Structures are given as structure tokens and as C-alpha cells.
Image (tube, grey):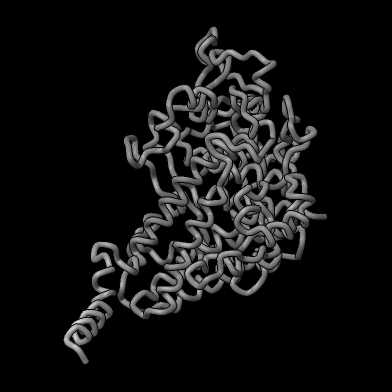
Amino acid sequence: MSLIGVLALVFTTSCTQDFEDINTNPNAPVNVQPSLLLRQVIYDYGEQMSYEGFTAGNLLGQYTTALDFNLFDRHNLKSPQLGGNPWPIFYQNLRDNELILNHSLENPSFRVYEGPARIMKAYMAAALTDLFGDVPYSEAFKGNQGTVTPVYDAQQDIYMAENGIFDNLTKGIAAIQAYDGNIALEGDILFSGDLDSWVRFANSLKIKYLMRVSSKMDVSNELQTLFSEGNFISENSLNAIFSFTDGEPNNFRLARLRIGDFNNIVMSETMEEILIDLEDARISRLFRPFASSETGNEYNGLLNGIDASSTTVTLADYSLAGTIFRENTGLLDANFMTSMETYFLLAEAAQKGLISADAQNLYEIGVSQAFDYWQVELPSDYLSGTGAMENGDPLENIITQKWIANMVNGYEGWIEYRRTGFPQLKTISASLNDDLIPVRMPYPAEEEALNNQNYTTAANNTDGNSINVNVWWDQE
């Protein structure tokens, strides 16, 4: 072999041997530690969905309305503004959470993360499917394995099948109870590594999702067992939340909107009527008196869905969102699951005869904890007067109180309205949906472009991606 040939062979061999070292960035780790991923998933999902829930979910749930020409508020849900596109939030965080789960199953040193990862997967998957219906699930989060066009799973399977919502909650609890290692759960900004709190969180979620599917199957035995065992989120100190701060970068994102965008968000007429009829002291926490009020202590809401091109409105005549959502966000939480919501769900179950319990007692605990959550003193006569469960339809009162309490989690109010019919939302002012209140979110346009075959099947199953086709648990 010639000298040139030898040199060429040596050079080629050397390049091949060094290729991986040369082309690997030492500052970009191949695997991210589960502790960092867990912190990221909890914070990113909580921060983004709190904003999404407030700006878009609150329009659908009729907590607030928009003064500008907001097509989303008029129920053209394919035109999101300042929110209304939660799809990428779900899939980014479900993907990262799947990495945590895979690490926990593959590496014994990370076993402590399995339970929380399964519980978070169940929580986010439920929120996703409750908004959209059938969605990519069993084949999703596998882009690194070459699956980039996942099939859409039926909502019933997402809830009920192996590795579905209920299965992951059960397996998550089992993994925590079986964990006998001494490695602490790090990156946990919900419970500071307390595994018992994750079990309570999972049990509260079971109660929530059992009620959500209760029209499709008998859930009474499972609910009774969960209630009798009592190992659920039962007081505000145990809530699955993390707190925002007053200043950036960890304040509520509404505080970072320009003032013109913030001034578009005002109290809805639905919310005004409910709070005024109840003489509810939380109104001063959730909203501000309108600027042109003669007494300086009056509140006024606007019917959702105005057409700003034909309707003239003056900001001074309507109540803006309260200071807790902008100037004082250190008092506000990212809300995953709370004791108040758990007790309202149990009160509903008792009222419907699904569990043997005192519905009124459960309701009153929920109301008391809801006032405490919003840092408002409960008037001594509220539960015997306007806020009494028997003051009208008890079931409507239970759901309406849960609706008020969940204002920071606005998609929940809309989802529960779809399930229960309460509170009684209004026909909006200038509907772009034939005066119908939507019952699902539409699949985003990028799905049609990037996952066309599977999207087409799902769209055909929803009458052309219609927002008026009920999801599985909402079908008669």
C-alpha cells in the first residue's frame, strides 16, 4: 500500500473513532434528570394552563367576557386569542412526563418517580380528552421511536383501558406504596417530595373522574370505598397547588399582559347575576367595582360574545378582574386539585345517592373551604341564607358553588357545565355557533396538516371536527 493510502486509512479511521466525541455537545446532556423534568412539567403545565383557563376557559365557562372583537368568545373556537390553543401545552408536557416514567421503569435509582409520573399522566390525559374527546394517546409521545403520526384513541379507552386514566392512577398509588427505597422525590413543587400527598391527590382525582363518567357506568361502590377510607385531599393545606409570586418571572401571566389586553377582560353577566343573587362576599376578591359606579362599590357584568363591530361598550361600565389576578398574584395558585373541589364532588355523589353520606355537610365543608381558599371571610349567615344548599335546587347549588370556586381553573367550569347543565349558562350576544354552547374543543389546524390520515378519521367521527358533538362521557 502506498504512503498516501496508509495516511488516508489512518485519517479515516481516526475520524470515525472520534466522530461521536467531536459531534457531542458536552454542555447538552443526552438524558435530563427526572427531578428537573418533574419540576419543569409541573410548573410549565400549571403556569400555562392557569393562563389558558383564565383567558379562554373563563370565556367558555362564562366567568368573564371580552370587550374586544373576540371570535373565540363568540364561539368560533378555531380563532383563539390570548389563549384557546391548549393542544401543544398538553402534548409537550405529556411527552416530558413520559420521559420521567420511562426513566423510572428503566433505572432502579429513579423508581421513586414512577408513582408521581403515572398520576401526572392520568391528570393531564384527562384534561386533554375532556376538552377534545378522542385524541392521540397510546401511540403518542413516541417520536423518538419513529411514531410521528399517532392514531386517535377513543375517549372511553383513554379512561378505561390498560395504561389509561384509572389504570395509571391505580398503578401510581401502588408504585408509591410499594416503594421501599431511600432516594427522595426531588423536583416536586406540589408536595415537596411527600409521597403520601401524591396518594391523596390520586384518590381525589379518582373521585373526580368517577363522577365524570358516572353517566356511563355504576361508580357507586368505588366512590363509597374512597369516601369511607378518607384518604383524599381533605383540607386546603393538602391541596395540589403551587403559588405564584408578585413579581416576574413566576407571577401569574395575566400580570404581564399589556394594560390594553388586560382591560379587555371583564366580569360576565352570568357571573354577576350568580354572585349578586348569593350576596357573595367573594365578588370583591374576584372582581373590581366598575369605574363609573356612583357608590364606588358596585359590580357590573357584560353578556358574553358581543360583536364589537356593531356594539359600543365603555370599559368604565364593567368590572375588571380582581387585583389578585394582576397586581397581587402572590396570593394566587396554579390549581391542580383541591379539597373544596373534592368535597363538592362528594356532595354531588351523596345528593345523587351514589354514596351514603350527608350531602349538606359535605357541601358546607366545600363552601367553607372555598371561601378560605380565596382568602375571604365566610359570613356567619351565608350557609343558612343565600348560600344554603336547600335554597333552591340542591344539586344546582352544589355545582354552582364548585363553578365559582374554580374560577382560576376556568376550563373545569365549562367541562362540568357540559356534564351537569349547571350553572345555567346564557345564550351569548352574537353567536357564531347558531346560539349553541360548544361541547368540545376543535382539533387544531396543524393536526390536519401533520397527521392527516388519523385526523381525518377523528374529524369524521365528530361531524367534521364539530364543536357541537358530545364527548363519550357526555353522550346519552
- Quadrant hosting residue 315: top right
In this picture, residue 105 sits left or right of residue 294: left
* Viewer-nearest residue: 50 or 451: 451
Res. 367 in view? no
In the rendered image of this protein, does residue 209 appear above or below residue 435? below
Total labels: the figure holds 0
Check the image and name the residue furthest to the left: 3
Q: Which residue is drawn at 66% across and 39% down?
A: 77
Instruction: Find residue 261 and report its horizontal and vertical position in percent.
Output: 49, 26
Check the image and name the residue furthest to the bottom: 1
Q: Residue at x 62, y 46 (%)?
A: 363
In this picture, residue 245 sits left or right of residue 84: left
* Viewer-nearest residue: 21 or 347: 21
In the rendered image of this protein, does residue 338 appear above or below residue 176? above
Res. 243 in view? yes
In the rendered image of this protein, does residue 411 appear above or below residue 204? above
Q: Residue at x 19, y 89 (%)?
A: 2
Instruction: Find residue 439 and report its horizontal and vertical position in percent.
Output: 72, 45
Q: The C terminus lies in which quarter of the figure?
A: bottom right
Check the image and name the residue furthest to the front: 2
Q: Which residue is drawn at 32% across and 69% down?
A: 184
